[in-house]
Image (cartoon, grey):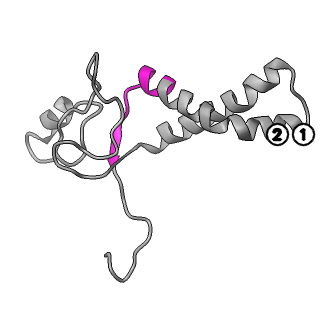
Amino acid sequence: MPPGSAARAEKLAWSACPNCSLDLRAKSFGGKSVYSRCPFCGVELTHVWWQRVFVIGVGLILAYGVPASVGVRGLPLLFMGLLCYFPGLVVAIILVFKMIPPKYVQKREAVMTLFRR
């Protein structure tokens, strides 16, 4: 490692932008809690893989767990879960990112086309 890079890695905030290294942590009141684009340098951001998996898991538990706890069983549970997945996902995003601050990585293009390389 080059000298000084260890000191820079220690000072890097958990919710820092991977491109410009500025802290994107949510302010106490009135700040945006989750970013899809860095407000300072404009690079597209996404969350680390384990936070995305965690949000999806919590969303599925909420979407199917709440109707099951009310007493819905069988095929109606499948349809209620599908109906409740979007609201469950929204609540999961709010819950997870209030407890664990988002850690960002730079969004990569998954598909290469002739016009965008």
Q: Position of residue 58 (x, y in %)?
A: 61, 30
Question: Residue 7: which disc?
Answer: none
- In the current view of this chain or complex, which residue is farthest to the bottom? 114
Residue 82 in the image: above or below residue 114: above
Instruction: Name the residue: 37% across, 27% down.
Output: 101
Q: Position of residue 85 (x, y in %)?
A: 66, 37
Which residue is denoted by mark 2 in the rendering?
Answer: 78
- Contact check, label 2 and label 1, Cβ < 8 Å: yes
Would residue 35 be found to the left or right of residue 62 on screen? left
The magenta-colored residue range is: 95-105
Residue type pointed to by label 2: Leu
Would residue 59 be found to the left or right of residue 69 on screen? left
Instruction: Name the residue: 69% across, 32% down.
Output: 63
Residue type pointed to by label 1: Leu
- In the current view of this chain or complex, which residue is farthest to the left? 3
Q: Position of residue 86 (x, y in %)?
A: 61, 38
Which element type, helix, strand or loop, lies under badge 1?
Answer: helix
User: Which one is in front, 92 or 22?
Assistant: 92
Label 1: few (<14), some or many (≥20) within 10 Å?
few
Instruction: Name the residue: 54% across, 32% down.
Output: 90
* Figure quadrant of residue 89: top right
Label 2: few (<14), some or many (≥20) within 10 Å?
some
Q: Cα distance, mark 2 to mark 1?
A: 5 Å
- In the current view of this chain or complex, which residue is farthest to the top? 28
* Figure quadrant of residue 14: top left
Which residue is denoted by mark 1 in the rendering?
Answer: 75
Q: Is residue 53 magenta?
A: no
Would residue 98 be found to the left or right of residue 39 on screen? right
Q: Is residue 97 magenta?
A: yes
Q: Position of residue 4 (x, y in %)?
A: 8, 39
Which element type, helix, strand or loop, lies under badge 2?
Answer: helix
Count every numbered label the image shows and give the total: 2
